[in-house]
Amino acid sequence: MKKILIPLLGLTLVVSCGTAKTSEGASAQSTSVAKADKAFLSAYKTIKADELKKNLYVIASDGMEGRDTGSPGQKKAGEYMINYYKSLGINPPKVLGSYYQKVPAEFMKKRGGGNLPDSENILAFIEGSEKPEEIVVISAHYDHVGTKNGVVYNGADDDGSGTVAVMQIAKAFQEAKKAGKGPKRSILFLHVTGEEHGLFGSEFYTSNPVFPLANTVVDLNIDMIGRDDAENRGKQYVYVIGSEMLSSQLKVINEAANKKTNNLELNYKYDDPADPEQLYYRSDHYNFAKNNVPVAFFFDGIHEDYHKPTDDPEKIDYPLLEKRAQLVFATAWEIANRAERIVVDKK
């Protein structure tokens, strides 16, 4: 997650605060996420702690050299991710013709990126069976802060946890597709670069979208979901940020999916406009929100190893990482398969 605060640019959060497990309302009753749905359950169960752990020990290994933007270590991590998608039979978007979307050095330099080299977003894609033109984006950044004074900053939680969660969610959707129950809407699995330096990869994508932003239904962004913070130590929870900023339906859908699955404690602390961290503006979903795309940002909090060389894979709570990834999958499943596209009815 980007450390430096981003200017508010005149936006105002009009969202509720506090902690909740579910919202009341008729829309919640229409959710298609149900424990009786065999296709959903079969796919959901493929998201497993042991596979998340296996992939994270690679992504956040010393050999990836902290995955700084455009570095050899980041490119090596990207190759591992692409080979994973290839092994699942998940292709890049046909219109792109590659898993890579180049993010030029010049684009980043103009936005304060200094002398960063060229880098790449990585995209994998499952086409929808009924509404392929409508796109559900599931995003995470795969860069971190690199190596400093010979010490590797592995970024296991930030954002190795989100990276491997997106990979596992993709596997779950692909398993459903193989069983003849693929998503009705298309799913774009978007791994962005340059987040730590200024949300560059997501800004480049939204400035040069592979699919029109007008057809983009939602961005479910995952940035740090493998740990807990001091305030919630030992709890089964996740922070959800911005889920009712642009759509009255997204928060309701997410809460209904949560209630019918792992029933985590959903914490809305960071939706408070007065919160000093201003996290709504500090991860990649924000570039979608600026373009009127509904977003939800899943986050575990700012813990003692944030942006330190001690953010290592052995400190990840893998069972909790599994549950949080399953929640994002359940939410995406509902959004991808419901009859109507979620509304954009807030400004």
Image (cartoon, helix red, strand yellow):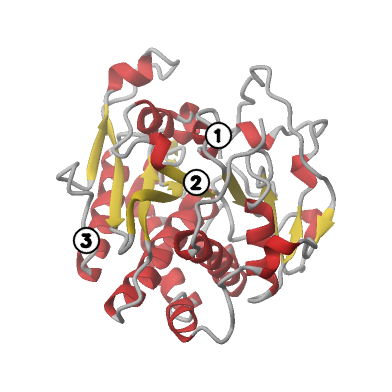
What's the mark number on residue 219? 2
* Circle 1: residue type: Ala
Of callouts 3 and 1, which one flags the residue occurring earlier in the amino acid sequence? 3
- Say whether disc 2 or disc 3 marks the residue closer to the N-terminus: 3
Q: Residue 326 appears in which quarter of the rendering?
A: bottom right
Q: How many marks?
A: 3
Instruction: Tell me whether circle 1 and circle 2 mark residues in contact (CB < 8 Å).
Output: yes
Give the secondary structure at mark 1. helix
In three-dimensional space, the C-alpha distance between marks 3 and 1, rounded to whole angstroms, equals: 31 Å
Q: CA distance from mark 1 to mark 2?
A: 8 Å
In the depicted view, which residue is nearer to us: 57 or 101?
101
Residue drawn at x 35%, y 76% as measured from the top left: 181
The residue that label 3 is drawn on is 83
Q: Which label is found at residue 289? A: 1
- Kind of residue at disc 2: Asp
> Closer to the observer: label 3 or label 1?
1
On the rendered structure, is 309 left or right of 281? Answer: left
> Which is more N-terminal, label 2 or label 1?
2
| Circle 2 Cα neighbour tier, 10 Å, few/some/many (<14 / 14–19 / ≥20) | many
Tags 2 and 3 in contact by the CB under 8 Å rule? no
Left or right of 121 on screen, residue 142: right
Task: Return the residue nearer the eye: 164 or 124.
Answer: 124
Give the quadrant of the C terminus. top right
Mark 3: which amino acid? Asn
Q: Is residue 79 above or below residue 193?
A: below
Q: Position of residue 177 (x, y in %)?
A: 31, 73
Disc 3 secondary structure class: helix
Q: Nearer the viewer, residue 149 or 288?
A: 288
Judged left or right of residue 83, residue 322 is right
